């Protein structure tokens, strides 16, 4: 699982108890998961279909830096299933887990469409494809599982 996105817990993210408001966290997770699904399926038309139990393991406080981790656990015909964990970036203490988030790949009519993917796409594959098509790689079109590949892809992208 890669933890791409970091968030700094600010006063506007707090609940009346002075800890991170669950709604803020869920918004961040849904966005992060959608971006992950878009990158994996190479289609911007994906929608959240299902979220399993959300387990708020521990709280975060103002000033904490948290990081959001995603990985794909299943590729269906039109869907992709992700697992998510949020943890404190400094202490690595788990804050939240979602075992199953299902996103559906849609066509231009908003109907479920086969995506043709069967496994996690790595950064070097995505960059190779963009290099071949001689288009610049858009920022954030990378879903990386492996730190080493990510570092290499980032270095290549800077050339
Ligand atoms: C997404 C939507 C088009 C899917 O329609 P649908 O009639 O359920 O489509 P299907 O029955 O063909 O299912 C599509 C995929 O979702 C999966 N799915 C459907 N219901 C599911 C559920 N409750 N849990 C897990 N997966 C589910 C199916 O297994 C299928 O995956 P597969 O093709 O990989 O096997 C429709 O439900 C919808 O528009 N929902 C609203 C989405 C939304 O607004 N989200 C919030 C904002 S992003």
Image (cartoon, grey):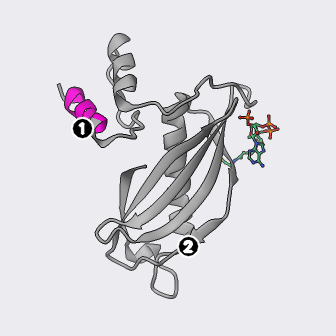
The image's mark for residue 151 is 1
Q: Under 8 Å from ligand 1: the CB of mark 2?
A: no
Q: Position of residue 33 (x, y in %)?
A: 53, 48
- Furthest-left residue in this view: 159
Q: Give the position of the C terminus as an image quadrant.
A: top left
- Height in image: 100 above or below 79? below
**Label 1 neighbourhood size at 10 Å, few (<14), some (14-19), many (20+)?**
some
Quadrant in which ligand 1 is drawn: top right
Report the magenta residues as a range: 149-157
Q: Is residue 112 left or right of residue 22?
A: right
- Furthest-bottom residue in this view: 17
Q: How many marks?
A: 2
Q: Indicate the quadrant where residue 81 lies.
A: top right
* Residue that appears at 59% across and 70% down: 55
Q: Under 8 Å from ligand 1: the CB of mark 1?
A: no
Distance from Cα at disc 2 to Cα at disc 1: 31 Å
Between disc 2 and disc 1, whose residue precedes? Answer: 2
In reply to whether residue 43 is colored magenta, the answer given is no
Q: Camera-side residue: 39 or 124?
A: 124
Q: Indicate the quadrant where residue 115 lies.
A: top right
Mark 1 secondary-structure assignment: helix
* Residue that appears at 49% across and 46% down: 71
Q: Indicate the quadrant where residue 111 lies.
A: top right
The image's mark for residue 12 is none
The image's mark for residue 56 is 2
Q: Position of residue 98 (x, y in %)?
A: 58, 60
**Label 2 neighbourhood size at 10 Å, few (<14), some (14-19), many (20+)?**
few
Q: Is residue 146 left or right of residue 48?
A: left
SS assignment for the magenta stretch, majority: helix
* Residue that appears at 36% across and 78% down: 62
Mark 2 secondary-structure assignment: strand
Q: Camera-side residue: 2 or 43?
A: 2
């Amino acid at each position: 699982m890669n933890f791409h996105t970091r968030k700094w817990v600010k006063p506007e993210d707090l609940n009346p108890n002075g800890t991170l408001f669950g709604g803020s966290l869920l918004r961040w997770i849904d966005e992060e998961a959608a971006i992950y699904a878009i990158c994996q399926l190479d289609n911007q038309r994906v929608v959240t279909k299902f979220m399993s139990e959300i387990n708020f393991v521990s709280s975060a406080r103002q000033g904490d830096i948290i990081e959001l981790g995603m990985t794909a656990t299943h590729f269906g015909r039109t869907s992709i299933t992700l697992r998510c964990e949020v943890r404190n970036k400094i202490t690595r203490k788990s804050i939240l887990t979602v075992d199953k988030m299902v996103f559906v790949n849609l066509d231009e009519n908003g109907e479920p469409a086969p995506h043709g993917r069967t496994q996690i796409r790595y950064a070097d594959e995505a960059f190779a494809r963009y290099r071949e098509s001689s288009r610049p790689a858009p920022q954030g079109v990378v879903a990386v599982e492996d730190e080493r590949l990510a570092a290499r892809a980032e270095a290549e992208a800077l050339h």
